Amino acid sequence: MEWGVFPNPVRGQSAISFWGLPPQTTISILTPSGNLCTRFRTSPQDPLPSWNLQDLTGKRLQPGLYLILVEYEGQKVWEKLYIEE
């Protein structure tokens, strides 16, 4: 599976977008220590899903390094995401 996220690093944007992900892909954003920030699934109606950089409580994530976990049909792929000021 070839996919990507943009922009990365995030510099002043209010959202990021994902490309190349099939429908029903689960995307999880985690801290480096493994704490879940947010999780969502792609859908056929949204070929370029985006995320507003907010955690599960609605707060914008602090600047720093985060991990993106993409899960689809038993496959797991990791990527780093860096959020700047």
Image (tube, rainbow, N blue to C red):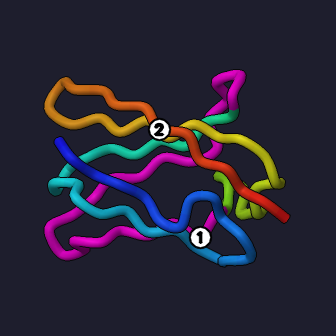
- Residue at figure coordinates x 35%, y 55% from the top left: 4
Q: Position of residue 46 (x, y in %)?
A: 25, 74
Q: Quadrant of residue 72?
A: top left
- Compared with 28, 20 (above or below) is below
- Residue at figure coordinates x 65%, y 64% from the top left: 10
- Residue at figure coordinates x 63%, y 58% from the top left: 9
Q: Element under label 1? A: loop
Which badge, 2 or 1, is on the more N-terminal residue?
Answer: 1
- Residue at figure coordinates x 25%, y 47% from the top left: 25
Q: Which mark is residue 79?
A: 2
Q: Nearer the viewer, mark 2 or mark 1?
A: 2
- Compared with 64, 50 (above or below) is below
Q: Which of 49 and 2 lies nearest the eye of the viewer?
A: 2
- Compared with 65, 49 (above or below) is below
Q: Confirm whether the magenta stretch covers residue 24.
A: no
Q: Callout 2, which amino acid? A: Glu
Q: Callout 1, which amino acid? A: Asn
Q: Confirm whether the magenta stretch covers residue 42.
A: yes
- For the record, the magenta segment spans 32-53
Crowd rating for badge 1 (residues with CA inside 10 Å; few <14, some 14–19, many 20+): some
Q: Element under label 2? A: strand
Q: Which mark is residue 60?
A: none
Q: Position of residue 17 (x, y in %)?
A: 43, 68
- Compared with 33, 84 (above or below) is below
Q: Is residue 70 left or right of residue 2?
A: right
Query: Would you name the residue on which mark 1 appears?
Result: 52
Q: Which of 62 and 55 lies nearest the eye of the viewer?
A: 62
